[in-house]
């Protein structure tokens, strides 16, 4: 009987944890997509929790300091690591994405302080949802500038 | 030239660690004490060797040797010398070296102690320490050489360890410099703290491994490493707190913990380590849960390795992070190898790790400790699930799905609440057997007090259910702890005739571990106050205002006074600083200076909040934007973070608690040893 008592207790805890993980995952899952994938999904993805990665197009950055509304465009970068490598690494892929006018682009709107790292050819990872008009409303904005951290070799022209 | 010397020393250290591993194994198997002694001396050689290597690297960093790739990447001429020194752990190659250096220091410390009674552990402790070191130094030697130099070849400029044919050494004028976000005192101390914690956990693991191999599976290994585990826990905890403080001060989003994979990577070994610290007490007192303790320390060790990899691979926050660097598969290989070997050893020693007594009562101290362990492991499972979920979902559905902070908050909140409840109940339960009646007798007074406090808070402070549950649990823990203290002190007062303060003092001094533990519990609930405060009651506002105009939030009024912008030429930084007046309910409180620093060399801006900290709340003002020409209008974002300073206050009390718990207590050990022997004898008689 003693054993049973502890086994039942253990099973209850296990069940509670599985339940917690299950419901929390279901409630806060975000689909991680590239811009091309997003376009392919079309309207089926509108208003779902999304996480999208893209290259920031520097010329498109607009910031209205009055109501703290930030808008910019991001260009498609591949999500797959192998594809990134064939384009010459993340920094190069971001550069190409911005330079290539045929790449799919997406307009992003974000309300809040302008992030310190927002600049041309930064990688933006945005969490939010897509409006029916194709504008992405970001609730969270994460930026990475791979050039500054990872570029192994100095640019000789810059010296 | 100097760089080549550094690499040479590093390579020799690598060979020394390998020799030490083989000599220790060979000496132990063939029973040649001289061989084991040779292995020990070889290991003692690693610290001077690595110190020399590190010295060379620091020399290169301080003296602007930009032909060395690592120096080029993490320093620049405009950085002050102390930052150039601390840039040692500012990049991956350097921080791996830093890890090995700490590891060799700790391993040397451990082997310098007297080993009389524990001689059979020695070779295997050496093996674990040196295999770990060999792995990290090998990483440096073969993949992440901090001494690689830049060469101009026909193909362009490339980093090489040795001078390639048809090339000349290339020396850039200036380095790229440490990311300004990392030039913060918190960020300078945070990585070493975390690493100290990581590395100290290797020592208990080494002893556990030695115990498994030699078959000396009683609790000797736990007693030998108890203090190591406590210090490891202290450093790891402090590393986490410092990291949070840095995020709060520097990242400018009004929070301190974002459930980022890097943070979780450092948090996971903390979870298993905390569970370990609790459950070893059951083994010491009752001879139970021996398999479990072994498993916990093995998990902690491997999570430490995993954490080192994740925090330093520099490719995080991308779900593709894992495969990007050549060292990824090697890390996973090493983790798999150590995990499988250790778990195989547990299975091999399964019978000798059987419990000496059986758990009978659901409310006994040991059952509640077990429950505490299960809760920590549940939080670990939640964290681990969150980190690997994108990989799993992609594998099974082809669709990459990630989970963010809401997932972690939702899934862990009930688990943390249950931990708080346990913190309140467990100190009152007895070892061996407790019933609802005995426990109820002890707990009803504190519970009544906690209900009264919660009711008071409901009327005066908040009506939020989640926060009220949290406050109830916190009040319960505080009252139970005080109640326990006073009960012990009154008992002393009666029996010894001491006054209450002397009684409190001697009580703590005589049972450092127990009362140190209670202080740690108190510090944890103080931190919980801060976390509940910022999670439940944070408010924010933002807006553009002219000089003389105000923004209002909670009871605060923030009035924009002036703005100044100037260049600091030698540092290459532009500072823009606003001055705002702060008043609360119409009472003038003082000025704050939110600012924004712009680093020209790295083209990076840094938003430094103006903070006014009180125990009631924290006013946190960010300067977002301004009109450059007229400086008449500026945009601010303001947070009021209630109670958040209890978090930082709690962390100081935590430090005091650990020092009390870890302080050497001579007389206690003398008492403890014979008591333990009797249990061993009974188990031997079984």
Image (cartoon, coloured by chain):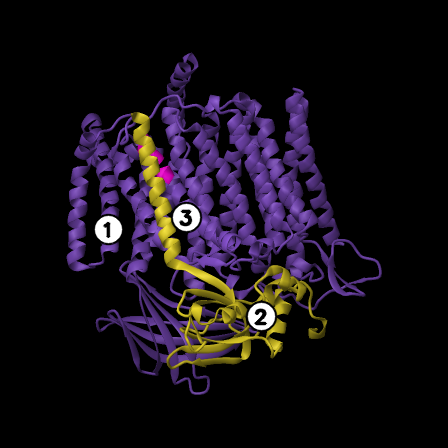
Chain colours: A yellow, B purple
Asked if residue B238 is among those painted magenta in the image, a careful observer would answer: no
Residue B549's spot in the image, x, y percent?
A: 30, 82
Task: Give whichever of A58, A23 is nearer the camera.
Answer: A23
What residue do we see at 18% from left, 51% from top?
B454
Q: Is residue B592 left or right of residue B398?
A: left
Q: Are marks 3 and 1 in contact (CB under 8 Å)?
A: no
- For residue B5, say whether it is visible: yes
Q: Chain of mark 1?
A: B
Q: How many marks?
A: 3
Q: Are marks 2 and 1 on the same chain?
A: yes
- Residue at numbered disc 2: B602
Query: CA–CA distance between discs 2 and 1?
Result: 47 Å
Question: What's the distance in space between the residues labelled 2 and 3, CA to CA?
Answer: 38 Å
Sooner in the amino-acid sequence: mark 2 or mark 1: 1
Q: Is residue B469 above or below residue A13?
A: below
Which comes before the other along the chain, label 3 or label 1? 3
Residue B382 numbered mark, or none: 3
- Residue range corresponding to the magenta coloring: B366-374
The chain carrying label 2 is B
What crowding class fits label 1: few (fewer than 14 Cα within 10 Å), some (14-19), or many (20 or more)? few
């Amino acid at each position: 009987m003693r054993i049973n008592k502890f086994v039942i207790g253990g099973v209850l805890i296990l069940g509670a944890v599985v339940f917690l993980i299950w419901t929390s995952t279901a409630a806060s899952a975000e689909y991680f997509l590239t811009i091309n994938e997003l376009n392919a999904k079309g309207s089926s993805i509108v208003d779902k929790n999304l996480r999208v990665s893209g290259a920031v197009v520097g010329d498109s950055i607009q910031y209205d300091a009055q109501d703290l509304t930030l808008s910019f465009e991001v260009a498609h970068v591949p999500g797959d690591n192998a594809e990134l490598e064939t384009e010459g690494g993340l920094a190069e892929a971001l550069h190409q994405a911005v330079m290539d006018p045929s790449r799919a682009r997406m307009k992003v709107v974000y309300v809040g302080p302008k992030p310190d790292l927002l600049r041309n050819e930064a990688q933006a990872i945005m969490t939010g949802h897509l409006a029916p008009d194709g504008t992405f409303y970001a609730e969270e904005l994460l930026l990475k500038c791979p050039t500054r951290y990872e570029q192994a070799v100095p640019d000789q022209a810059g010296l | 030239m100097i760089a080549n010397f550094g690499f040479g020393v590093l390579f020799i250290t690598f060979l020394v660690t390998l020799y030490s591993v083989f000599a220790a194994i060979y000496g132990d198997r063939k029973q040649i004490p001289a061989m084991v002694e040779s292995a020990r001396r070889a290991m003692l050689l690693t610290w001077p060797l690595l110190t020399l290597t590190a010295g060379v690297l620091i020399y290169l960093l301080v003296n602007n040797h930009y032909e060395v790739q690592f120096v080029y990447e993490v320093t620049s001429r405009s950085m002050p010398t102390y930052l150039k020194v601390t840039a040692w752990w500012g990049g991956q190659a350097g921080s791996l070296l830093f890890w090995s250096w700490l590891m060799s220091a700790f391993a040397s410390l451990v082997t310098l102690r007297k080993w009389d009674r524990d001689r059979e552990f020695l070779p295997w402790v050496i093996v674990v320490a040196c295999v770990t070191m060999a792995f990290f130094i090998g990483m440096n030697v073969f993949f992440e050489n901090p001494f690689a130099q830049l060469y101009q070849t026909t193909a362009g400029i490339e980093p090489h360890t040795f001078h390639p044919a048809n090339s000349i050494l290339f020396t850039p004028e200036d380095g790229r410099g440490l990311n300004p976000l990392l030039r913060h005192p918190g960020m300078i101390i945070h990585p070493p703290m975390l690493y100290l914690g990581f590395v100290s956990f290797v020592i208990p693991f080494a002893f556990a491994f030695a115990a498994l191999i030699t078959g000396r599976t009683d609790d000797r290994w736990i007693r030998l490493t108890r203090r190591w585990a406590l210090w490891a826990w202290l450093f790891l905890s402090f590393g986490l707190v410092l990291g949070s403080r840095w995020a709060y001060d520097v990242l400018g989003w009004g929070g301190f913990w974002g459930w980022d994979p890097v943070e979780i990577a450092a948090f996971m070994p903390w979870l298993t380590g905390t569970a370990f610290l609790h459950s070893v007490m059951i083994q010491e007192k009752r001879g139970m849960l021996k398999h479990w303790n072994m498993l916990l320390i093995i998990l902690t060790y491997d999570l430490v390795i995993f954490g080192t990899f994740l925090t330093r691979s520099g490719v995080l926050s991308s779900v593709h992070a894992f495969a990007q660097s050549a060292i990824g598969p090697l890390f996973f290989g090493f983790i798999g190898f150590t995990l499988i070997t250790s778990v195989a050893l547990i299975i091999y020693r399964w019978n000798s790790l059987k419990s000496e007594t059986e758990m009978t009562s659901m409310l006994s101290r040991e059952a509640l400790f077990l429950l505490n362990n299960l809760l920590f492991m549940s939080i670990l499972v939640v964290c681990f699930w969150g980190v690997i979920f994108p990989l799993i979902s992609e594998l099974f559905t082809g669709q990459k799905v990630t989970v963010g902070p809401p997932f972690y908050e939702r899934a862990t909140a009930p688990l943390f609440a249950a931990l708080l409840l346990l913190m309140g109940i467990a100190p009152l339960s007895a070892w061996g057997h407790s019933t609802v009646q005995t426990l109820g007798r002890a707990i009803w007074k504190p519970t009544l007090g906690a209900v009264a406090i919660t009711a008071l808070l409901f009327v005066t402070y908040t009506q939020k259910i989640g926060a009220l549950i949290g406050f109830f649990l916190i009040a319960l823990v505080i009252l139970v702890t005080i109640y326990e203290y006073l009960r012990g002190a009154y008992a002393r007062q009666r029996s010894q005739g001491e006054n209450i303060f002397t009684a409190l003092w001697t009580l703590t001094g005589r049972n450092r571990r127990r009362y140190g533990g209670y202080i740690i519990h108190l510090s944890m609930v103080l931190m919980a106050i801060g976390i509940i405060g910022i999670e439940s009651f944070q408010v924010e506002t933002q807006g553009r205002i002219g000089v003389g105009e105000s923004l209002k939030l909670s009871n605060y009024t923030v009035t924009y006074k002036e703005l100044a912008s100037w260049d600091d030429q030698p540092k290459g930084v532009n500072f823009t600083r606003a001055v705002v007046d702060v008043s609360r309910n119409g009472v003038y409180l003082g000025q704050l200076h939110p600012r924004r620093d712009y680093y020209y060399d790295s083209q990076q801006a840094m938003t430094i909040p103006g903070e006014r900290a009180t125990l009631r709340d924290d006013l946190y003002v960010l300067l977002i934007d301004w009109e450059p020409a007229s400086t008449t209008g500026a945009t601010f974002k303001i947070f009021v973070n209630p109670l958040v300073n209890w978090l930082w206050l709690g962390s100081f009390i935590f430090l005091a608690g650990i020092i009390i718990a870890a302080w050497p207590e001579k007389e206690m050990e003398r008492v403890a040893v014979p008591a333990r022997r009797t249990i061993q004898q009974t188990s031997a008689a079984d």
